[in-house]
Image: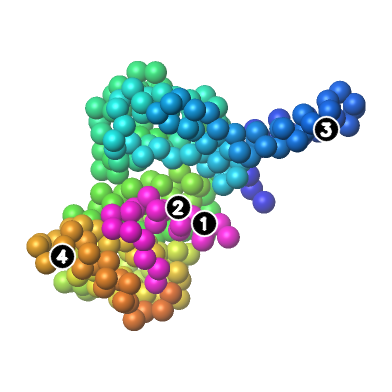
Amino acid sequence: MIYSAGEVKAMEKFLELLRRYKAGEVTEEKILGAVKNFSLATESFGFATIDHGRELRQGFPEVVYAPGKTKEQLKIIFKNLYERSAGNLIASRATREQFEFLAKEIPAAIYDETARMIYVDRDETLTRDENKKILIVTAGTSDVPVAEEARLTAYLWGNAVGTCYDCGVAGIHRLFAHMDEITSASVIIVVAGMEGALASVVGGLTNRPVIAVPTSVGYGASFNGLAALLAMLNSCAAGVGVVNIDNGFGAGVLASKINKS
């Protein structure tokens, strides 16, 4: 099994404590306390309680949802995670204003305008297997921001990721031009608004798991993505799972877990 940098760091600390216990230098009570702290450690700032044990339990530090947080709150949370963890970091749906405020103290932070994501890419233990690639397909160019959120998330989780953008059912020949990528991918994320039909089409072309992401792209009767969501949930193609409207992040994480299982 390949461990993330954060998992390695936490396990090294715990192994050192076990060696000291074996040598009679620490008590059983301290070992039990360490087990709790490593897996369930939290730190409260009043406005937020940070889950520091998540990196050990899940292989990735807690991800910060930026909307609704002040620039100062986001900076405090992200800086604390940066200092207390070893893996890659993400603040999703962030603004450039939030990033510029945060970057003054964390120069390693990067901002992706399209994905609306602040991130730190520092985990050198990750190996991205080109033979197990996640493919992201969009119906239209307007779906790309959600797709880029999924792509960057999957990449930071340690996956090789490919993209096929703007190949929806209105010009389905554009999709068929990407059959080699579709049939060779390990997991496929399909991002579509409007009527959301692309997920069913892709699901019928491959035996790979398909994660459908409805987007809020569309005119009035699309109901901000609800029409695409219902279409995807009612897909007649077998093996299609659906995440929430505009949830590129959730699709990226799920695809990574499937890809690494």
The residue at the point 71 percent across, 32 percent down is 34
Label 3 or label 1, whichever lies nearer to me, is: 3
Which tag, 3 or 4, sits closer to the chain's start?
Answer: 3
Disc 1 crowd rating (10 Å Cα; few below 14, some 14-19, many 20+) is: some
- Secondary structure under tag 4 reads helix
Query: Which residue, given by chain and number where applicable, does mark 3 sit on?
Result: 28
Q: How far is mark 3 from mark 1, CA to CA?
A: 35 Å
Residue 103: quadrant of the picture? top left
Q: From the viewer's perspective, is 91 left or right of 141?
A: right
The residue positioned farthest toward the bottom in the image shown: 236
- Residue 157's x, y, as percent? 49, 46
Which tag, 3 or 1, sits closer to the chain's start?
Answer: 3
**1 and 2 marks in contact (CB < 8 Å):** yes
What is the span of residues highlighted in magenta in the rendered image?
240-261
Up-down: is 199 above or below 141?
Answer: below
- Residue 141's x, y, as percent? 19, 56
